[in-house]
Image (cartoon, coloured by chain):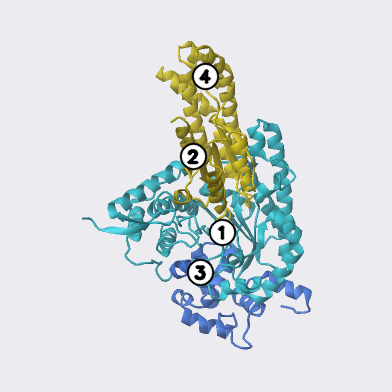
Chain colours: A blue, B yellow, C cyan
Amino acid sequence: MGLVTHYTSSGLGGIRTVGDLVGRVQLRNKCKISESKKYVMDKLGIGYDEIHDECFMRNFREEHGLGFVTTTGGAPYGIEAKINIEDILDIDIACCNHLREVTRLHR
Amino acid sequence: MEEYVKVLHDSMVGCKVPEILGAVDKSLEAGMTPVEIIDALSAGMSDVGILFERGKLFLPHVLSAAAGMNKTMEKLTPMLASAGGSTGPKTAVVMGTVEGDVHDIGKSITSTMLQCAGFEIHDLGRDVPLDNFIKECKENGCTMCGMSALMTTTMTGMKVVIDKLQQEGIRDKVTVLVGGAPVTQGYCDKIGADVYGESASETTQKVKALASD
Amino acid sequence: MPAEYRMRMGDGTRQWMTKEQIRADVEDGVNNAVDCAEVPALTEDDICRIVDIMCEKGRTVSVEPGEEVILTQDGGELKLLNDSGSSSPVLEMSRTAAIQVHERALGMDTFEVAYFDPSTKMVKPVIGMEMAHCQNVMYNTIIPMLYMFMPNIGLYYQPTGPFGNPPDLMREFKIDEAMEAGDLAMKAMRDDIVFIGERILSTGMDGLDFDTTASGGDLDFVGSLEAVEEIRKTYPDADIQMGMSAESVLGINGMCEYKGQLAAGLYPHQQVKLAEAAGVSTFGPVVNTNSSMSTAWNVARAVTMVKECSKVSKIPLQVNMGMGVGGTPMFETPPIDAVTRADKCMIEIAHVDGL
C-alpha cells in the first residue's frame, strides 16, 4: 500500500501524461525507458518536456482522443481511446484487434 | 589436529558421502576424539546451510551432506558410548506453517537444516491447526516449537500458540521459533517468541547455540 | 556532536544515524551484494550518491523531472479489495472499479489484473469467469493491462496437489522419488500456465504477468520459462512480464536446466538472461530486504545487484519495490521517507526502466 508514494517520487503519471503510451511501447518493443520515450515523442511529434507535463498532455490527449482521467461527456474513453492510441503510436492493440474480429468494424 | 578439522569441514562442504567418511576415518587414525570430529562436521554443516541459501549449493547437496553426517553418527555413537560419553537424546522440534497459510518452502528448508544439525523434527506441514503445535509439545516431547507464516493475516496465529502454551503451563519448557517473510525481530519480541531467524541457516545457527547452552 | 539523520530499519522502525554510520552501512551493503551475487561493486560516485540521497532533509525525495519511469502494480485490484497475503483495506467496490481507481486516481502507467487467489492452480478452474472479467476490463480502461498469476509450484505438491513434496521426500532421503515428484509437478504447472495464458490472451488482453516466479525454486522457474516459450508460439506479440520472488533461485532440484543453463543459484543478472531467452518482454528482479539492517544497507545492496542486472539486460527492467523488496522496508504501509529514497537510488544508480 504505497502506490501514491511511488507515483509522486518517480512515476510517469499514466493517463495524466504519456505513462500508458510509454508503457505500451516498452512492453511491445521490449525497449528501455529512454528508447520508449523517444518512440512516443517521435510519434506524437512533441518534445521531452511536453511528454512529462500534465498540463500540456491534458490538452494533447483531449485533442487526439487518447483518453484522460476526467472524461468529459462523449470524449473517447476505454477501447475508443485505445483505437486512437493505435493510430497515433502505429502499433496494434490486442483488444482493438479482438473487437474488429468479432464485429464488422474494420481498421 | 587443525589440518584434520579443516579436512573434515571441507569434506562436509564438498557434500560427498565417501569423502566425508574417508575424512572421518583419517581423523580417527590421527587421534581425534569422536566429539572433536562431530564438532568439525557440524561447523561444516552450518556452512552448507549458508551456501545453500546463497545459491552455491542445492537441496540434494544438503541432503547428501546430511546423509554423510548420519553415517558418521552411526559409526561414532558406539565409540562415544564405550568411552562413557553419549551424544545425548536429540532435541525434538515441532515445525509447521500456521493455520490458514499454505506456504511451506522456507519452513521445509529450515526443517531440513535442523534435521541435518541433529535435531529430531516433527514437521506437521502447512495450514497446521494451532492446537496441533501444543499437542506435539505436550504429548510427543517437543521442547522447541517452530512456526512459519508468509501472510500478515496468518502470522497472528503465532501469538495464539504462545498464549496457549502459557495456558497449558508449559511455556517455560518450550522454546518458540518464528520466521517467514512478514515476520521480523520486532514482531518476535512483541509476541514473546524466543528466536527469530531471517533465514533458514540463521534460525539453525541460533537454535544450535541455544541447544548447546 | 555529529549531525544525525532519520533512517529506517528494514522492518520500518525509525533509527537515527550519523553520516559516517550511513556511509559504513552503504559500503557494507554493497560488499554483501558483491559477495552473494558475485557482481561488481558500486563506484565511489554511486556510493556517495546513495549517502547523499539518504541524508536529504526532506520527508520525501524524488527523481528529477524528466527522469520518471513506468510504474505498475503487480498485485492487481485485490490490493484494494481483499487479503492478498497481507491485510488489505477491504474497500467494497467491484473489481473493474478497483482497476479504474488505479488507472485514474493512482497514476499507474500499466497494471496487472488478478483473481482473488492468483496462483495458477486456483485460477484454472475459474478461467471462464476470468476471461469475461478481462473482456470487461479491456473495454473500460486505457492503460496496458496484463493478467497476473503466480506459477506457485508449491500448490502442486501434497496435500494441496497430487504430487509428493520434494523437500519432505528428501528429508526422508527418498531422493529419486523427490526428483520424480518435482518433475511431474513442474510439467503440470507448466501445462496449466499455458492453458490459462492462451485463454486470457484470446480475449484481447494486452499480456500476462508472472508474479513471484521461482517461489518454489528452480523447478518453478524452469517450468515458467518453458511456459512462456510455449505461449509465444501462439501469441508472438503478447506483452509478457516476469517478476521474481527472491533474489536467488533456490536449488530444490539442483539439476534442472533451461537451454543448457542450470537454473539453481542464479541471481538477477543471470535470471534475466534466461527470461530474455524465453521471450519475456519485461523482467522484474527482486532483492530481499533484511529486516534487521538499515534502509541504507538494504538499498545499497539492492541497487548493487540490480545495477548489474540492468547493465546486462537487453529487455526493460521493472524492479520490484513492494513491501520487503528492493530496499523497501518489510511493513504493510512502508514509510514514505524510506520508499522514496529507495526509488530514487534505484532509478538514478541502477538505471531501471520501471518500478
Q: CA distance from mark 2 to mark 1?
A: 31 Å
Disc marking residue B50: none
Let me know if marks 1 and 3 both belong to one chain.
no
Labels 2 and 4: the sequence-earlier one:
4
Q: Are marks 3 and 2 on the same chain?
A: no
Residue at the (68%, 36%) spot, across then down: C178
Q: CA distance from mark 1 to mark 3?
A: 35 Å
Looking at numbered disc 1 in the image, what kind of residue is underneath it?
Ser
Q: Are marks 2 and 4 on the same chain?
A: yes
Quickly name the residue at label 2.
Answer: B172
Residue C108: quarter of image: bottom right
Q: Is residue C57 left or right of residue C195?
A: left
Tell me the kind of residue under disc 3. Answer: Lys
Q: Chain of mark 4?
A: B
Mark 1 and mark 4 in contact (Cβ < 8 Å)?
Answer: no
Q: Residue furthest bottom?
A: A73
Q: CA distance from mark 2 to mark 4?
A: 26 Å
Q: Tell me if residue B169 can be seen.
A: yes
Pick whichever, B138 or C77, lies toward us.
Answer: B138
Q: Kindly report which numbered mark, 4 or 3, lies closer to the viewer in this rendering.
A: 4
- Which residue in the structure is indicated by mark 4? B86
Seen in the picture, residue B140 relative to B16 is either above or below; the reply is below
Q: Nearer the viewer, mark 4 or mark 1?
A: 4
Amino acid type of the residue that numbered disc 4 sits on in the rendered structure? Ser
Q: Please determine if labels 4 and 3 lie on a single subunit.
A: no
Q: Which residue is mark 1?
A: C86
| Residue A101 percent location from the top left of the image | 77, 73
Image coords of residue B51 (percent x, y)? 50, 36
Disc 1 secondary structure class: loop
Q: How many marks?
A: 4
Q: Give the labeled residue for mark 3.
A: A37
